[in-house]
Image: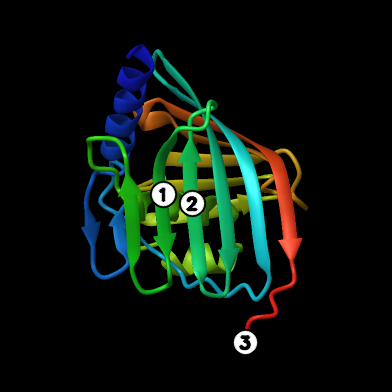
Amino acid sequence: MTRLVKHLSLATLLCVAGACSSFGHRCTQFPQTNGQYCLQPIISRDLISMQQKVELNFNDLHETMIVDLEVNAKGLQFIAFTPLGQKLIQINDDNFKITSNNVLPTHLDSMMLVGLLQLALWPSDAVLNGLKAPLIMKEFAQERIFFSNGKIVMSIQYADSFMPHNQLSINMPHINLRLDINQLLITPKENHAQ
């Protein structure tokens, strides 16, 4: 029961962090700013399948999740599990609409979660294309920093700039949120679908 309460707290946190609102067809409010991020189309021809361990820290809350992420030309699928294998949420994005299956009895902003994935892992030109004023991004060899009205609202640090998905940290200091993400498994496969 304590574990379920923790996951409900996590779900509430993600809802608050994502502002639980979306604008436009594929745009979402960036957490605690008046800027938006508009999701960018997925253009990968190859299937990439990865599994990551996500450590979430928010104030005194510490939570661990295992995330399965699959990306191909048709879209992406994101599934988060407890370390014991209980599915928490599944999100599918087919480049037109986002659907989610949430086993937690609270609303999660699925579009914001997909947006965070893109902000962290998509090429910088795609991310810049999706940012709407007053949001701006500055990119360095192993870091992306997002500003709104001159204040840092999010930073993403990469342990390896050549393989950014292997190990990264997402910090949102204005809401005291930190996500530490470590690669567990990656499987690139050639996509033969026409």
Residue carrying label 1? 90
Q: Nearer the viewer, residue 15 or 31?
A: 15
Q: Nearer the viewer, residue 185 or 38?
A: 185
Residue drawn at x 49%, y 36% as measured from the top left = 81
Sequence-earlier tag: 1 or 2: 2
User: Which of the labelled discs sits on residue 130, or is there none?
Assistant: none
**Circle nearer the viewer, 2 or 3:** 3
Q: Are marks 1 and 2 in contact (CB under 8 Å)?
A: yes
Sequence-earlier tag: 3 or 1: 1
Residue drawn at x 50%, y 68% as measured from the top left = 75
Q: Characterize the local packing of mark 3: few (<14), some (14-19) or many (20 or more) Cα atoms within 10 angstroms.
A: few
Residue carrying label 2? 78
Residue carrying label 3? 194
Label 2, label 3: how many angstroms apart (C-alpha)?
A: 23 Å
Residue drawn at x 74%, y 49% as measured from the top left = 161
Quadrant of res 158: top right
Quadrant of res 16: top left
Residue drawn at x 38%, y 55% as measured from the top left = 135
Side (left or right) of 16 relative to 90: left
Point out residue 93 in the picture as x, y percentages from the top left corner.
42, 64
Quadrant of res 95: bottom left
Sequence-earlier tag: 2 or 3: 2
Work out whether 49 lies above or below 61.
below
Label 1, label 2: how many angstroms apart (C-alpha)?
A: 6 Å
Work out whether 186 lies above or below 53.
below
Label 3, label 1: how many angstroms apart (C-alpha)?
A: 26 Å
